[in-house]
Image: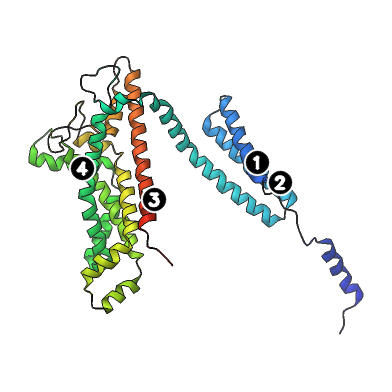
Amino acid sequence: MSLSTTDTEPDERSAAAEPLTHGTLPASGPPLVLLGAIATGAVLWLLGWNPALSGIVAAVGYTAVVYVWSRAVEEARAARDRLITAVVSSAFLLAMLPLVSVLATVVSRGLARFDGEFFTHSMRGVVAEGGGVHHAIFGTLIITGLTTLISVPVGLLTAVYLVEYGRGRLARAITFFVDVMTGIPSIVAGLFAYALFVLFFGPGVRMGIAGAVALSVLMIPVVVRSAEEMLKLVPNELREASYALGVPKWRTILRIVLPTALAGIATGVTLAIARVIGETAPLLITVGITTSDNFNPFDGRMATLSVFSYYEYVSPGVPPEASLDRAWAAALVLILIVMALNLVARLISRLFAPKSA
């Protein structure tokens, strides 16, 4: 049975009325709106508004303008896509505000003491202006180096055991305790190390190796987790091919598995070092502070950048401006060291990553 002309006419009219194409926003439209929103937030901040409130107003304004503009020009689906993209972009920019604020504050206040004396002198005999962080820089590097020497072998061997050998209750117990140690407060690690060394050296003990032990409690679970994930990414086909050639398991791990995962393991270790190098609470308890150079981690107090910055800020001299400048400059040095470690991690990941065809 054929359709009548009257039945098909409404469908033809609706099809003719519905456009086959929709308009689109210009490619430069959303970025220009974003720049305008950022400029508006900056103007509000300069006018005396709270920085957080200025950022929220800019984010909300950017999202609303993009959505309304897209809804008027494009179809509903494209407008919803623009809305979600704007919300995600706004959330990212709001999350960046504290980081940018911290960096701007530390750089602006820390550059005042970036001079030769600051990097070549200690605080011995200095009560007002002058002095430097020579002793704190070397103390930080020595204690962090000892922490790495303790944490990397323990963490890497633990990860190898969990991935290659661990089965049953022992492996589950180790995994559980690694997860617990990942969230342990840093002050608890410092108290543990202090209590351990008090048993051998008596009350009031302060030395660099105690700080290294405290930091290793925080660093070991990070190394275990990162190395474990990298070892799991090594294809089983490589292991099976090695076993098929009669290679023992320990040699397969040493010659096949570890070199394949080397880039990821090295990156994880570097990021773990950056994680603990700025810790203050454990070092306050176990290492303390000194104004002189002490490069022997087994004898007496040592200075570190984080503790030095803390004491210079909470116990400034008279006048306090000199101490505050040293505190901000030490914080800037610590940030630069952490940034350098992150860049090294990226470089290691790129240089030692397995080459693909």
Helix, strand or loop under label 1:
helix
- Report if the CB atoms under discs 4 and 1 are less than 8 Å apart: no
State whether residue 138 appears in this view: yes
The disc label shown at residue 346, or none? 3
Q: Earlier in the sequence, mark 1 or mark 2?
A: 1
Q: What residue would you read off at disc 1? A: 33
Give percent across and percent down for residue 357: 44, 67
Give percent across and percent down for residue 274: 32, 44
What distance separates the C-alpha of mark 2 from that of mark 3?
40 Å
How crowded pointer 3 is (Cα within 10 Å; few <14, some 14-19, many 20+) is rated as some
Q: Which of marks 3 and 1 is in front?
A: 3
Q: Which of marks 2 and 3 is nearer the N terminus?
A: 2
The disc label shown at residue 69, or none? 2
Helix, strand or loop under label 3:
helix
What distance separates the C-alpha of mark 3 from that of mark 1?
33 Å
Foreground of the two, 296 or 37? 296
The disc label shown at residue 121, or none? none
Side of 29 where 212 appears, left or right: left
What residue do we see at 39% from left, 23% from top? 112
Helix, strand or loop under label 2:
helix
- Identify residue type, mark 1: Val
Q: Nearer the viewer, mark 4 or mark 2?
A: 4
What residue do we see at 87% from left, 65% from top? 13
- Identify residue type, mark 3: Arg
Side of 202 where 281 appears, left or right: right
- Report if the CB atoms under discs 1 and 2 are less than 8 Å apart: yes
